Amino acid sequence: MNAPGTLNGGNAAGFRYFDILMALFVAVLLISNIASTKIVTLWKFTFDGGTILFPLSYIFGDVLTEVYGYRRTRRVIWTGFFAALMMSLILWLVQLMPPADGWTNQEAYESLIGFIPRIVMASLVAYFTGEFVNSWLLSRLKVKTEGKYLWIRTIGSTLAGEGIDTLLFTLIAFWGVLPHDLLLTVLISNYLFKCSVEILFTPATYALVGFLKRKEQTDVYDRGISYNPFRF
């Protein structure tokens, strides 16, 4: 087990599961961006389709920060950022290219996939801000509580991060597109749904964190580090 504030081996090469978590984190982000083009209703909640999966990115963010520390999580957040940006640019480029003769789905593409650049822009701004707030707060609370009360740290950091994320995403993605009453409904529903998922998944988060700490033989405490999100 590493001493508090140290890293195992200095890079991710010494870990068995870090790359898997990073891949899942990025996959969740990209799938959520595409699914967000549809507004859905589930029970009493009304939200964009990406909300079904997106809360998992915060759970992965919690697990990554708790086990591997803020500095490695920062690299994962940036990896997701550039992957989503690349996806958006490619989809936009394909939209601009002339359709082949006999292919009659250009309007359908533009009405659905063509909306994605704005969704991804909203997602990037909201995701960047919310994920770093989530990771920073969980990291600081871990040091303050000396590693105790994981449930308070995961839920508390998610309430803050998801609040900022949901507000920025909803306003950037849907302002001027949705009626104000529906916009408010989506905002509130998104936030409540995301936070509910975090709370419900707390036992699974505990189990995954415990598993990774045992298998990876690491438990990072971020003492004396830089929290600058632009520093690698």
Image (cartoon, grey):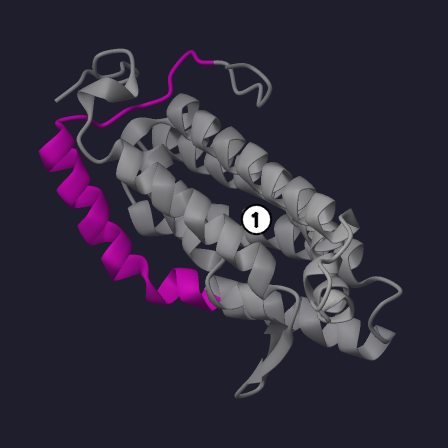
Give the camera-side residue of 181 and 23.
23
User: Which residue occupies 59% across, 44% down?
Assistant: 87
Q: Please, what is the three-letter code of the amino acid marked with disc 1?
A: Ala
Give the image quarter of residue 18.
Answer: top left
The quadrant the N terminus occupies is top left
Is residue 153 shown to the viewer in this render? Answer: no
* Residue 184 location (% of width, % of height): 76, 72
* Residue 149 location (% of width, % of height): 30, 45
In the structure shown, which secondary structural element does the residue marked by tag 1 occupy? helix
**Left or right of 28 in this view: 180:** right
Compared with 36, 156 (above or below) is above
* Residue 145 location (% of width, % of height): 34, 34
Magenta highlight on residue 202:
yes
* Residue 133 location (% of width, % of height): 56, 37
Compared with 146, 102 (above or below) is below
User: Which residue occupies 16% across, 43% down?
Assistant: 210
Q: Residue furthest bottom?
A: 43
Which span is picked out in magenta? Answer: 196-225
Which residue is labeled 1 in the image? 160
**Left or right of 174 in this view: 27:** left
Main SS, magenta region, reads: helix
**Left or right of 14 in this view: 167:** right
User: Which residue occupies 10% across, 36% down?
Assistant: 214
Compared with 118, 215 (above or below) is above
Magenta highlight on residue 217:
yes
